[in-house]
Amino acid sequence: MGCENSKSDSNDEDEIQEHEDEFNENRVDSIKSTWPILTRDRMQTGSNLFRHIFLVEPRIKALFKRDRSMTDEEVLHSIEFKHHVERFMHSMDQVVENIDKDRDNVEHMLLILGAKHATYDGFKEDYFSVYANCMIDTWESVIGEEFIKEVRESWELLVAYVISRETRQILHLIIKQDSSKEYDSSS
Ligand code: HEM
């Protein structure tokens, strides 16, 4: 068990190092120069992303329903949905702002966010992959012609970084839960 933990820690470090090397000046520039386009209408961009997510994985909508009687259309106009879009865009502000500065704080924020999402009823870790794919498609539709190869690759790197940090905490929670179940059944 101890060995497994130290192995995963060293993998984590390798991964962090990998991102350190990949977020070079050009990539940071591609991300920072296109974020203002994406935030020209923050609510529109964020809503488009989550609408796209709901089309790809309709089950995700249920997470934003106050009660079962809420229709899909009501979800899209609900205060809960709009708040989440705002919160999501605000988190991305922080990631983009600090990607070449204070990466420790961003990592901490993402770890906590991952842990919180894992506690939401019906949330599945796979949903972060749906989010990652949909984000690239949505960014392409908003950025348009300026979404050149270098820009796409930079955002792909950033979204991979975001979900790797968010899901790491979920994995830790699952491992913890499983080992406490093992302990319970053997005791
Ligand atoms: C498919 C992907 C996602 C789903 C289904 C999802 C769902 C949720 C739900 C149900 C909540 C709780 C209700 C609420 O506060 O609105 C929540 C909270 C939140 N989400 Fe997400 N989320 C997703 C992805 C993300 C991502 C990628 C980010 C940021 C990078 C994010 C940022 C937040 C924040 C900041 C909160 C508030 C947490 C708090 O209470 O402190 N979400 N999310």
Image (cartoon, rainbow, N blue to C red):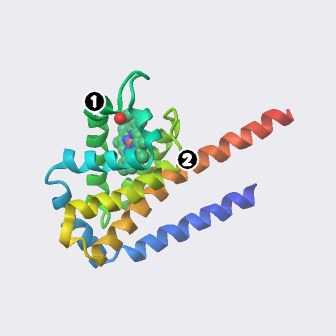
Kind of residue sitting beneath label 2: Ile
Residue 97 in view here: yes
Compared to residue 167, the image places residue 24 above or below, namely: below
Q: Quadrant of residue 143?
A: bottom left
The residue located at (30%, 53%) in the rendering is: 92
In the drawing, does residue 178 fall left or right of residue 117?
Answer: right
In the drawing, does residue 111 fall left or right of residue 148?
Answer: right
In the drawing, does residue 107 fall left or right of residue 185?
Answer: left
Q: Quadrant of the C terminus?
A: top right
Residue position marked by numbered label 1 in the rendering: 78
Which residue occupies the foreground of this view, 77 or 15? 77
Rendered location of residue 152, percent (x, y):
32, 71
Which residue occupies the foreground of this view, 84 or 109? 84
The residue located at (39%, 61%) in the rendering is: 159
Rendered location of residue 167, percent (x, y):
51, 52
Residue position marked by numbered label 2 in the rendering: 170
The residue located at (26%, 67%) in the rendering is: 31
Which residue occupies the foreground of this view, 39 or 56? 56
Residue 104 in view here: no
Q: Residue furthest left?
A: 40
Other residues around mark 1 within 10 Å, as few (<14) / some (14–19) / many (≥20): some
In the drawing, does residue 16 fall left or right of residue 44?
Answer: right
Kind of residue sitting beneath label 1: Ser
Q: Secondary structure at mark 1?
A: loop
The yes-or-no answer for disc 2 within 8 Å of ligand 1 is no
Q: Quadrant of ligand 1?
A: top left
